[in-house]
Amino acid sequence: MRIVLLGAPGSGKGTQAKILAAARNIPHISTGDMLRAAVAQGTRFGQKAQAIMEAGQLVSDEIMLGIIAERLAAPDAADGFILDGFPRTRQQAADLEELLDQLGVPLDAAILMDVDFDILMKRLTGRRTCSKTGKLLNVYFSPQAELDAVVEAGGELVQREDDNEETISNRLNVYREQTEPVVEFYRKRGRLTTVDAQGSIDEVNERLVGAVA
């Protein structure tokens, strides 16, 4: 199984990718993790990326594709992979398609984790961390008893600075502008499958498993 997982921030694609990857015994390839690993291992493209990042510049699509190619050549990706975080633009999607065709490992599907934007705003702006235990809660979705328990135990519900409404709104707007054309790219090629990503982790996972069966 070779899939690209698409979805806005807060859609749960990272969580679902990890669960599905473990169940299928294939790697969950997050581009951020992959980039850091390539730099740490000193691979050919990792060295190029490191030099660019140290100069304060963005890593080019060409180098990212090289890092992806290196990663897919690893033995654990022989039976498939879940790619998370790339492509983010239509051009990256076209370049990735060409690369995978060259490698002889074309995608089986692009899975869109679909969540209403109002729900995404609540998922992201409502996130809080217990100051005592580090447990992640949400003021909109967590049971009230769990929220009360934090305060009763002498803790606080802490919000990350970048989880404010303005920042989240900007992130979602960037997603709309850059990534939604990627969705259309895969739709036109008949590769797109949409999964309703609202509900509990187990409910969403059941739908995702059904979509890739």
Image (tube, rainbow, N blue to C red):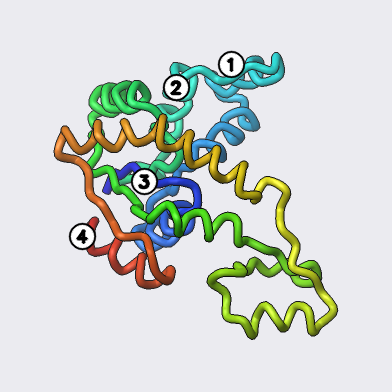
Q: Nearer the viewer, residue 58 or 36?
A: 58
Sequence-wise first label, 1 or 2? 1
Question: Percent x, y for residue 66?
Answer: 44, 22
Residue placed at 62% from the left, 69% from the top? 139
Read off the residue under disc 2: 66
Residue 151 is left or right of residue 59, and the answer is: right
Q: Secondary structure at mark 4?
A: loop
Which residue is labeled 1 in the image? 48
**Residue hosting label 4:** 213
* Residue type beneath disc 1: Lys
Which quarter of the picture shows residue 69? Answer: top left
Of callouts 2 and 4, which one flags the residue occurring earlier in the amino acid sequence? 2
Q: Residues within 10 Å of mark 3 (few under 14, many from 20)?
A: many
Residues tagged 1 and 2 counted as in contact (Cβ below 8 A): yes
Q: At numbered mark 3, what does the secondary structure look like: helix, strand or loop?
A: strand
In this rendering, the answer to whether 30 lies above or below 42 is below
Name the front one of labels 3 and 2: 3
Secondary structure state at the residue bearing disc 1: helix
Q: Nearer the viewer, mark 2 or mark 4?
A: 4
For the residues carrying marks 1 and 4, which lies nearer the camera in this image?
4
- Residue 79 appears in view: no
In space, the residues marked 1 and 4 are separated at their CA atoms by 38 Å
Place of residue 58 in the rendered image (x, y in percent of width and height, measured from the top left): 59, 20
Q: Is residue 147 visible?
A: yes
Rounded to the nearest whole Å, what is the CA distance between mark 1 and mark 3? Answer: 26 Å
- CA distance separating discs 3 and 4: 15 Å
